[in-house]
Image (spheres, helix red, strand yellow):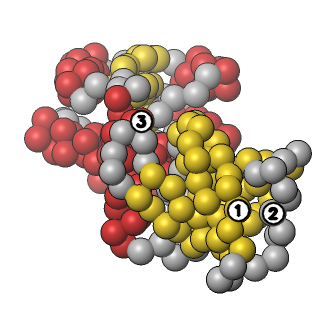
Amino acid sequence: MTLSSMVVSRDWPEVSVLECILSGLHIGVDVEPEPERARAKLAKSKIDALIVDCDLEGTTSFLSGLGDGMNTVPLVIISSPNGRGQLRDTDATFVFEKPISVERAVHTLSAARNLIVDGRLRYHRHCLEIPAYLTRGKNTRMKATLLNLSQGGVAIRTRRPVALAGSLWISFTLPGSKLKLKMQGRVVWNRQGDTGVRFVKPSRRARRDLQLWLAQRYLSN
């Protein structure tokens, strides 16, 4: 799986180091030496990580103008401890100084990659179509078709509407495995025969099994 990044810098020796490290982490690199052009690119496309050289003229305005809608993980490179003042109005997640230490940069960028992948996995919905069963109380059992699955819940389709009130249990077997999950959930929406169920306090083992199964499917794509 290849992620994407943008490096805003014209310090070419340092850029070369970053390109080598990012490539090894399977992160594509778009180098932009002009902050204004970088801003224009970010407004039109989505990236996974943003790396900014604070020595570059115009980066103070660039960083303060970053919006929440860019969905980036800002990684800010600073030339000296004095440069940290530029970070006060940003949401910088990782900071390191120039000249770049290869060992520290690998560690920092690896952590950033893990953060990005973890965020994707948390919200990723895996589409599928498998049988499931809903139970409410001791005697109420309903067949359903599970349409998509995430760490936080599922979307299902049933012949009869599912009441919004109260909690329920949903049981299903993960495709390609022998893992049978039974998750407590709460109905959060109904729409044209489809129902959204949010998981409620899944067991540690069930949560781990689901996370691993989803990660294998996601990373294989």
User: Disc 2 residue type?
Assistant: Val
Residue 47 location (% of width, % of height): 51, 29
Residue 38 location, quadrant: top right
Q: Amino acid at mark 1?
A: Met
Of residues 143 and 155, which is closer to you in this image? 143
Q: Is residue 197 visible?
A: yes
State the separation of the CA atoms marked 3 and 2. 30 Å
Q: In the displayed orientation, state which residue is furthest to the left.
A: 103
The residue carrying mark 1 is 142
Q: Quadrant of residue 117?
A: top left
Q: Secondary structure at mark 3?
A: helix
* Residue 14 in view of the camera: no
Estimate how packed mark 2 is, as few (under 14), some (14 to 19) or many (20 or more) residues with alpha carbons within 10 Å. Answer: some
Q: Which residue is mark 3?
A: 218
Mark 3 is surrounded, within 10 Å at the Cα level, by few (under 14), some (14 to 19) or many (20 or more) other residues, namely some
Of circles 1 and 3, the one toward us is 1
Where is residue 59? Give x, y as percent: 51, 34
Query: Residue 53 vs residue 155: left or right?
Result: left
- Mark 1, secondary structure of its residue: strand
